[in-house]
Structures are given as C-alpha cells and as structure tokens.
Image (cartoon, helix red, strand yellow):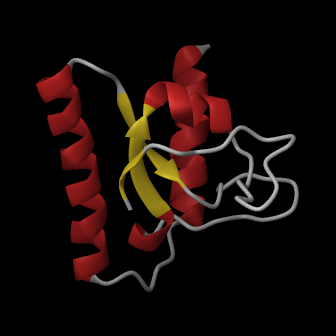
Amino acid sequence: MVAAGGKLRREAIMRATPKWLSAEHKAEIRRLYRIRNELIAATGRLYEVDHVVPIRNKSVCGLHVPWNLAVVQRDLNQKKRNYLVDHASTQERPPLTEVCVP
C-alpha cells in the first residue's frame, strides 16, 4: 500500500509541475532536495521538501515550483498535512514555524 501512495504522490507532483519551468527552476528544485538529504545526513533527523501552498487542497492547488517549496522537519510537515497555513488564523491548522529553507 505504501508503494501505491508513493506512486500517487509522484503523479500529483508531476501534474503540479508546470511545463514552462526553466532549467534554472528545475536546478533549484533539485538543490532543495539535495539540501534535504544533507540535513538528514548531518542531523539524523528526517526532513521533507514541503509544498507551502499544498498541491492537493479543497480550496487551492499549489504548483511544484521552487518558490512554493521549503525544506522542513518531517514532524512539522506532517502536522501541517495538506492545509493551507494562514499565519493570521491558525486556530484549526497547526502552524508551520520551523522552515529551514524558504
């Protein structure tokens, strides 16, 4: 079942990746994933590349673009889930406070 979830996630990312991304944009995305891997290796903590504006949400669909990605600790990202974090009103949604790389 995990493999199916991973496949669905990859498909969602592919759909959210615009065809107009430049080579520089794609290089920046790869850089963020490298930073995630380096943080994991250096700290032993788990990190993820988060979509600040979720790519799957009831009210909005974010893109898989460098300016919508941030490297965050896995536990914080899992608290955020696919919510769109509104920093003015976080009553129902957990805040995403410890962003490593904007």
Residue at image location 51% in from the left, 76% down from the top: 18
Residue at image location 72% in from the left, 52% down from the top: 56
Give the camera-side residue of 11 and 67.
Answer: 67
Horizontal side of 41 relative to 58 (left or right) equals left
Location of residue 5 in the rendering, given as x and y in whole percent from the top left corner: 60, 27
Work out whether 24 lies above or below 95: below
The residue furthest top is: 1
Horizontal side of 102 relative to 96 (left or right) equals left
Residue at image location 52% in from the left, 20% down from the top: 3
Work out whether 94 lies above or below 54: above
Horizontal side of 23 relative to 61 (left or right) equals left
Please tell me in which quadrant of the rendered image residue 28 appears.
bottom left
Location of residue 49 in the rendering, given as x and y in whole percent from the top left corner: 41, 46
Location of residue 60 in the rendering, given as x and y in whole percent from the top left corner: 79, 65
Work out whether 53 lies above or below 37: below
Give the camera-side residue of 27 and 90.
Answer: 90
